[in-house]
Amino acid sequence: MGILADLQREAERQRRAQEREQRQLQREYERAQREVERQAAREEKERKKLYVEQRERETEQQNQALHRRIDELEGLLVATLSVDDHIDLASLKQKFSEPLFNDRGLSQPEPAPELEEIEPPGTFAALIPGAKAKYEAAVEAIRAEHADARGEWEKREAEREKALARAQAVHGEEVARERQTVEAANAEIDRFEEKLDAGDPGAVVDYLGMVLEKSRYPDDFPNAHKLAYIPESKQAVIEQDLPEFDLIPEAKEHRYVKSRDEITASKRAESQRKAIYASVISQMALRTLHEIFEADRRQHVETTVYNGVVDTIDKRTGQPARVCLISVRTTRDAFEALQLDRVDPQECLKGLGAGVSTKPAELAPIRPVLEFKMVDDRFIDESDVLSDLDQRPNLMALSPSEFESLITNLFEKMGLETRQTRPSRDGGVDCVAWDTRPVMGGKVVIQAKRYGGTVGVSAVRDLFGTVHNEGASKGILVTTSGYGKASFEFAEGKPLELLDGSNLLYLLSEYAGVEARIDPPEDWVDPEGAEMKEEPAAS
């Protein structure tokens, strides 16, 4: 019994030891599990903290962008005062730099082949019968081989020298052409400067246009203007497009609401938005007057008439309207006496006797001091969009007016005499052109549609009606997209030409040397709907 009892006690002891070990392991496992859970909780807390911080930074960035925007709008006038608006025409001249000549390795002659020398047989070797004859035969063979190699080398050298002379001649011609191009461009600048010095009205208008085009406004501001110069009175007349009221931010400040995980915006008081807008358009008027007078160092302009206008839709009729909000006439002496960095823009305009809309945000019109009228009231100065297109090669990134100017420029480069039409009185015509060829030529009306979807047949019908109304011999419809079957059916047999996006890209490349692309953004919406519905053709 003693041995059995001992065995039983040992077994019990081992069992209890195993249980203690298992309980220990369980406690360690549970402790590790709790640590994992605590670590996960800490990480989740840190993640939430970082997310909140990121959303708060996002909110702060939006507020900073909003404040920068307001500062930009309120500083339009001050921003130009530190800029010298005069354009030094001499600085536009190119300096000719002769391109390096690439000889493609032709300048380096090939080394002439060398005559291999053979050691003559020694005194004892010469005693061997036939040794001398073998030596002389070997020498003769080497000399013959060398003569052949020399002849081939001379042929190659002659060809190399001819190729080098040809390459030098081609390079000389290229240098001469490039020099002539630079000299011609510089001579054109000299001729323009001579005309400007003489007060040629066309040169004065072109120079002042360069000044206004150089003026940098925020990207979403309109950049269109019209200019005229009356030499008899030394008067410049400017009509500048102003931004609309919607450009003023509605938000006053952004705030992150943690409980809803949402960035909200408090609204800016409508009265404050209207005050900012009135200040913006007043600053633009003063800024433009300042730039014209400062840039005109030749003193061609003594008086300037400024009209600030907005292109909009008349809510009463639904028709396009061109509303004048600011109009002022001032002299150089009166304007240069102003301290523009210290004035209140609106009060300053009143002091100059300007007409200013009492409710510009509502587009309440005023009567201009002087109506802007030139050769034909619907014709406007073309802006050379093609010269800037390489910097923004996506045609869908152009504004509607810029796209119309692009089409006008293109047809001009194709040999037509073109005039871009004034949007408010164009009668459905974006551009009027004249084909000066006898018999086959005549008046051409052109419409441009910057669409992402298919152009419907109704646009083709409208063009055909316009051709009749204008008494034109031909109508051309240009689009960045394409046309449906009904459009081509309707145009068949009529004096109409339909140019789609691929045609346009080809013409730009062929006649303007511009490699462009058509890439509508994802949120693109066509002016007359997301997609023009194809309608059945009508005769």
Image: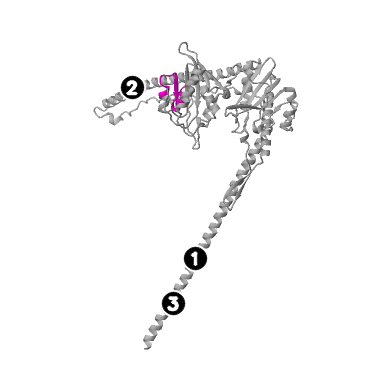
User: Which residue is located at x 33 percent, y 28 percent?
Assistant: 118
- Between the C-alphas of marks 3 and 2, the distance is 107 Å
Q: Where is residue 444 in the image (x, y as percent from the top left)?
A: 49, 18
Q: How crowded is mark 1: few (under 14 residues within 10 Å), some or many (20 or more)?
A: few
Please give the residue where the numbered disc 1 appears in the rendered image: 32
* Left or right: 366 in relation to 423: right
- Between the C-alphas of marks 3 and 1, the distance is 22 Å
User: Which residue is located at x 40 percent, y 27 percent?
Assistant: 485
Instruction: Kindly identify the amino acid type of the residue bearing the numbered disc 1.
Output: Ala
Instruction: Select label 3 or label 1 by which is in front.
Output: 1
Magenta stretch, residue numbers = 489-510
* Left or right: 434 in relation to 484: right
Please give the residue where the numbered disc 2 appears in the rendered image: 147
SS at mark 2 in the image = helix
Question: Which labelled disc corresponds to residue 17?
Answer: 3
Residue sitting nearer the eye, 531 or 112: 531
Residue sitting nearer the eye, 410 or 421: 421
Q: In which quarter of the image is the C terminus?
A: top left
Indicate which disc, 3 or 2, sits on the residue closer to the N terminus. 3
SS at mark 3 in the image = helix
Indicate which disc, 2 or 1, sits on the residue closer to the N terminus. 1
- Between the C-alphas of marks 2 and 1, the distance is 94 Å
